[in-house]
Amino acid sequence: MGFGTPTVELEGNYSTWTLYDTFQDNDASNAGLRQEAIFNGKETTISLLDIYSYMIKTYTITTKTLSSGLVSDMNYFDGDSYLINEKKVSVQQTYLVVMGVTTTFPNFSKIYIVKGGALVQTLTNSDLGIAANSIRNVAISPSGKYIIVSGYIVALAAMGWVVLVGS
């Protein structure tokens, strides 16, 4: 009996993403590509950043809670937020999430979810509960299980985030 290297599953096997949570973020700017979301490696928290307010907050996935913000005068963005592409792919690049433009940049109205090079799901702004042409940015967790989308949430009449979970 041999003891080999344990197998670690880095990514899940997801084909559909559905609504997990929607919440308001009073510090998120209503401007395209001004928010960023970064998942921790264990996929228990998401750091939320806004380029205009310089606000950093933490969203805890299991409790669906948002921390109060930390204000800083440092610039933690390396250029425009849409250039930080590593937040758009899963750890082994099996999953990719991108925004689609139906009018003019930066008015995003849908997201595309790609798995293994094939389009598996398209969600429009109305599917997400986000106002027309008001999707602002997206990010995906390391395993591909969670996707987060910023935008103007219709039901809240405010800026916020939509969290999706894969199955």
Image (cartoon, rainbow, N blue to C red):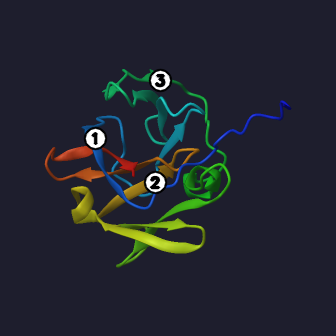
Alpha-carbon span between mark 3 and mark 2: 22 Å
* Amino acid type assigned to the residue bearing label 1 in the image: Asp
Find numbered disc 2 in the image and state the secondary structure of the residue it sits on. strand
Report which residue position mark 3 lands on.
71
Q: Quadrant of residue 123?
A: bottom left
- Residue 127 shown left or right of residue 123 in the figure: left
* Amino acid type assigned to the residue bearing label 2 in the image: Val
Q: Residue furthest front?
A: 1
Report which residue position mark 2 lands on.
138
Residue 45 percent across, percent down from the top left? 47, 29
Q: Quadrant of residue 134?
A: bottom left
- Mark 1 packing: few (<14 Cα in 10 Å), some, or many (20+)? few
Q: Nearer the viewer, residue 5 or 143?
A: 5
Foreground tag (2 vs 1): 1
Residue, x 81% and y 35% (percent of image)? 5
Q: Nearer the viewer, residue 112 or 51?
A: 112
Find numbered disc 3 in the image and state the secondary structure of the residue it sits on. strand
Q: Are marks 2 and 1 in contact (CB under 8 Å)?
A: no
Residue 128 percent across, percent down from the top left? 26, 57
Find numbered disc 1 in the image and state the secondary structure of the residue it sits on. strand
Residue 87 can be seen in this image: yes
Q: Earlier in the sequence, mark 2 or mark 1?
A: 1
Badge number at residue 21: 1
Quadrant showing the N terminus: top right
Q: Nearer the viewer, residue 71 or 134?
A: 134
Badge number at residue 36: none
Q: Earlier in the sequence, mark 3 or mark 2?
A: 3
Foreground tag (3 vs 2): 2
Residue, x 47% and y 34% (percent of image)? 46
Alpha-carbon span between mark 2 and mark 1: 15 Å
